Amino acid sequence: MKCPLEAKRNEVLLDYGSGKLDAGDVSLLEGHLESCHACRDFVQAQRAVWDALDVWEPAPVSADFNRRLYQRIDRQVSWFDRMMRPFQLFGLRRVVPIAASAAVILMAGLLIQRTPTPPPQPQHDTAQMEALQPEQVVLALDEMEALSQLSRPVRADSADSKM
Amino acid sequence: MDERVNRDAGAGVTALDPDAELMLRVRDGDGVSFGVLLDKHRLPVVHFLYRMIQNQAVAEELAQEVFLRVYRSRATYEPTAKFTTWLFRIATHLALNSLRDGKHERLQERLDDTSSDLPARQVADSRPSVEQSMVYQARLDEVRRAVAALPEKQRAAVLMHKYREMEYSQIAKVLDCSESAVKSLLFRAYETLRARLAHMA
């Protein structure tokens, strides 16, 4: 007679051996095991494996395991961590928004201070400057005209002298 | 104790896993919580690594690296899975890398050295006789050789299933594979172990 568990024997019997089946399924399975040679052999062999694996007790962990780990952690702490360590006491999550807000306020203050207000110019000076400037231009042009007139007789004299 | 991880649709996983809650406190700067996690999981991690690598000194060194990585990752920790899943994923990754890096020398070292890794085994009320010690040692050697002969992923799956009593789904997350792949790994591993160790019943 073919075993109804054949396709799922591994999973069902492993779960049975691991104590993961519920009580109803355990009862059904144990009834099946009484009549199924293949499943019975599987269960016995699997129990032997687990009993053998239980023999393998590992050695105790070194007494200085934690101390060595914390030493490694301290060596690994970066300069950034050292800088941030005081803030970590208050919780980084709370400090970051506070620090960001403080930075914004500081930047705003610096920007306000950087923009110097120019000293106010008296109005009459401005008017005078506006009035003076065209006159100065006219004066400069007159001077240039005068210079150019002075230079003409000199060139005529020099030409006569050569003859 | 049930370790449940609920999924919060909007904001990722809301961790009810007590270890994940401790790790969130570590993320917030609570060093004491890291110590609690270390004390709770140090032995299981070292023992898992020892059974994978079969060298106590290397196992402890790798275990230190596991916890160092946990600590270094604290600022970005998010409880997307059970804490032990994450922890054993790191441990398995380091173990597999270590085995690949030093495969031949470690295999020889661990099979030859049967004295330094022995636990202090005592029988209640009386010391074991020489014969008992020899029988115990022979059985232990056979178990170690049988496990060492398993392919690395099968070995990891068996160790997590047998000694950590992890569910298939959790082992799948640790090994980053499907549940059916985990079952396949386990069934083949146990089949091999039954062939080698069933006579020890």
Image (cartoon, coloured by chain):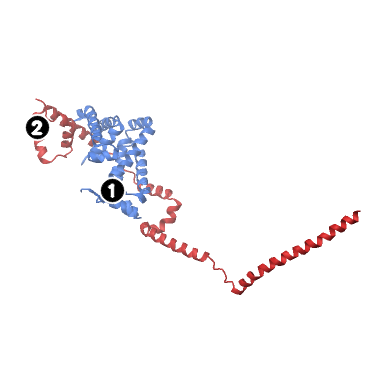
Q: Position of residue A76 (x, y in %)?
A: 42, 48
> Which numbered marker is on residue A32?
2
Secondary structure under the numbered disc 2 in the rendered image:
helix
Q: Is residue B171 visible?
A: yes
Of the pair A57 and B62, the residue shown nearer to us: B62
Q: Nearer the viewer, mark 1 or mark 2?
A: 2
Q: Amino acid at mark 2?
A: His
- Locate residue A55: give its quadrant: top left
> Which numbered marker is on residue B94?
none
Secondary structure under the numbered disc 1 in the rendered image:
helix
**Residue at image location 10% in from the left, 28% down from the top:** A36
**Residue at image location 68% in from the left, 69% down from the top:** A135
Is residue B187 left or right of A149 when viewed as pictured? left
- Locate residue B187: give its quadrant: top left
Q: Which residue is mark 1?
A: B40
Chain letter belonging to callout 1: B
Q: Is residue A56 visible?
A: no
Q: Compute the Cα span from label 1 to label 2.
A: 41 Å
Q: Position of residue A156 (x, y in %)?
A: 85, 58
Q: Position of residue B194 (x, y in %)?
A: 21, 29
Q: Position of residue B200 (x, y in %)?
A: 20, 29
Vertical order, A140 against B103 (above or below): below
Is residue A115 left or right of A71 when viewed as pictured? right
Q: In this figure, what is the number of numbered marks? A: 2
Q: Amino acid at mark 1?
A: Lys
Is residue B89 left or right of A118 when viewed as pictured? left
Of the pair B7 and B53, the residue shown nearer to us: B7
Q: Colour of chain B?
A: blue
Chain letter belonging to callout 2: A
- Locate residue A105: give its quadrant: bottom left
Of the pair B161 and B47, the residue shown nearer to us: B161
Q: Colour of chain A?
A: red
